[in-house]
Amino acid sequence: MRTRLIHSVLLCAGTCLIALPQGCNSRPSLRPETAQAIYEISMANQEREDAQEESFASMDWSLGQIPSNGRILPLNSPDGQWIAVQIGPDVTNASLLGLPDAPPATDNTVEIWKLDLAASSVVKHGTLPEPLILGRSADQEGFLVESPRSGGSRWIGKVKWTTGEIDWIVQDNNVNTFGSLGPEGELAWCTRTLKERHFALAVRFANGEELGIGPNGGEWLMPSWSTRSSRLSVFFLADDGVLSLLSLDAQTPRLLSESPQRFDLMTGSTRQDVLRARSGQPVIQGTPAPPIEEVIFFHPVTESIYVWLPTNLLKNPPFPLSKDSIVATKDPLSAGYLVGTSGDLRWQDPDDRLGFVRVRYGTTIPRITTSRVAPYLLIIPGSGEVEIRAMMKQTPGASAPASLANTTAG
C-alpha cells in the first residue's frame, strides 16, 4: 500500500514538472559536485530510514517443555498465562474433519498448563477427562474442545482455564465441529446430522439467537471470527471442487444473509485442503487486533501464507508472505508480520515481500499476547513435546529485565 501511494505521488510530481513552461524556474543550477553530494546524503538518509523500518530486535527465553500430541497446535490464553495442549495418540484427519468414517478418538484428551512468564516456568494445572479433541479458539475465560460421543455425534465445550470446568455450549445428536469464538461471546461452528455428509454453517449471536445456513451445492468448513469486528470468514467447498473463502458481516442475522465478500482460491480441492489452510491459524479473542480487517490462511497450492483484506475497497486478491511460510500473525508493535517457515521465524514488512528480518532459526509458531513481560509466545515443535518460549522486542542498547538475568536468550 505504501509503495503504491509513493508511486502515485511521484507520478503527480512528474506531471507537474512536465507542465512547467520553460524559463519559469529562476533558481540557479547546481554544480555537478553539489548535486552529487546532495544525492549521496539523500540516499544515506533513505538507507537509515529503511533500516529502521525493517529492524526487529528481540530476545526470547525458554519457559519449559510440555508434552504434546504434535498434530494439533496448542491454544494459549490472550494474556499468555495459560496454554492447552493435545495429548494421546495422533488424531487422524478424518477425526479432525468430523467425517462419518472417522475412528473414535477414545484415548485423546487435553492438558492445561500455567505459564509463569517472569519466573520462566511452566506448571501442569490439570488433565481433562477423555475423549477430547482440542479446538481452534480461545479467549480470556477459556478455550474450545470437541467431544466425540459414543453414538457418533460430537459436542462442543468451553473449558475454563482456571478450573478445567467444561461448559457444553453445543450438545445435541448432530456432529458439531470447527467452533470459533467471537469478540462479543458469539459462536460459529459447522454441523451435520449423522446421516448427512455435508456441513451447514451455524452462528450463535451475542444475544443467544441462532441462525443456520444450509450446505446448498457444497459445504461450509472452518469458520473463524475476526478479532477486531463482527466479521466472520469461512470456507465453502463446492460439489465441483471449487474452494472459496468468504467474509460475512455477522453483526446481525439480516447482515449475515446479505452478499458476502468472496474469493475463489482453487479448483479440485478437498476437505484436507481446508484443514491445511486453517489449522495453523487459531482464533484467540482478546489479543491486540490488527489495524484493518484481514484473514490469514495457508494456501494449499502455493504452500505459503496469504493475507486477504476482504473489506478493501480495491478488492485486491490475497497477497503472499514469505515463500515456504506455514504460519503468521500480525505484529501489533510494528507494521509487519511475524512469519514462521519450516526453517526460521522472521519479521516481514508486507510492502517488501522479498525482504525480511530473521528473528530466530528453527521452526517456530508465533503467538501474540497482552502481556507486558512477554508480548509474544513462541511454540517450538519437538518429538512428543513442544517448547514454550517467551519473547519481547528489544531496543538497541537496552538491557534485559532483572527478572530475566539468569535466563538464556534464543
Image: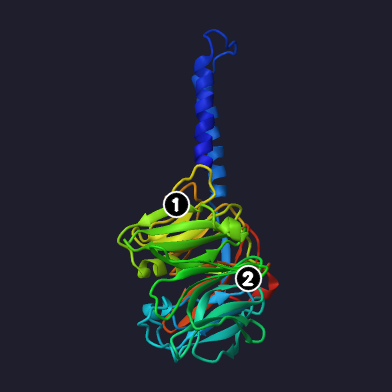
Element type at mark 1: loop
Question: Furthest residue to the left?
Answer: 268
Note whether residue 387 is visible: yes
Using a 10 Å C-alpha cutoff, classify the residue at mark 2 as few (fewer than 14 neighbours), some (14 to 19) or many (20 or more).
many
Q: Nearer the viewer, residue 157 or 353?
A: 157
Residue plotted at (38% across, 78% down): 99
Q: Amino acid at mark 1?
A: Pro
Q: Position of residue 332 (x, y in %)?
A: 61, 58
Quarter of image, res 403: bottom right
The residue wearing badge 2 is: 78
Residue 65 rendering spot, x and y as whole percentages:
52, 82
Residue at 42 percent of width and 81 percent of height: 194
Of tags 2 and 1, the one toward the viewer is: 1
Alpha carbons under labels 2 and 1: distance apart: 27 Å
**Does residue 31 appear in this view?**
no
User: Does residue 159 sit above or below 338 in this rendering?
Assistant: below
Nearest the camera: 169 or 371?
169
Three-letter code for the amino acid on which mark 2 is drawn:
Pro
Crowd class of label 1 (few under 14; some 14 to 19; many from 20; radius 10 Å): some
Are the two marked residues, 2 and 1, in contact with CB atoms closer than 8 angstroms? no
Lateral position of residue 274 relative to residue 386, left or right:
left
Q: Is residue 38 above or below residue 316?
A: above
Mark linked to residue 318: 1
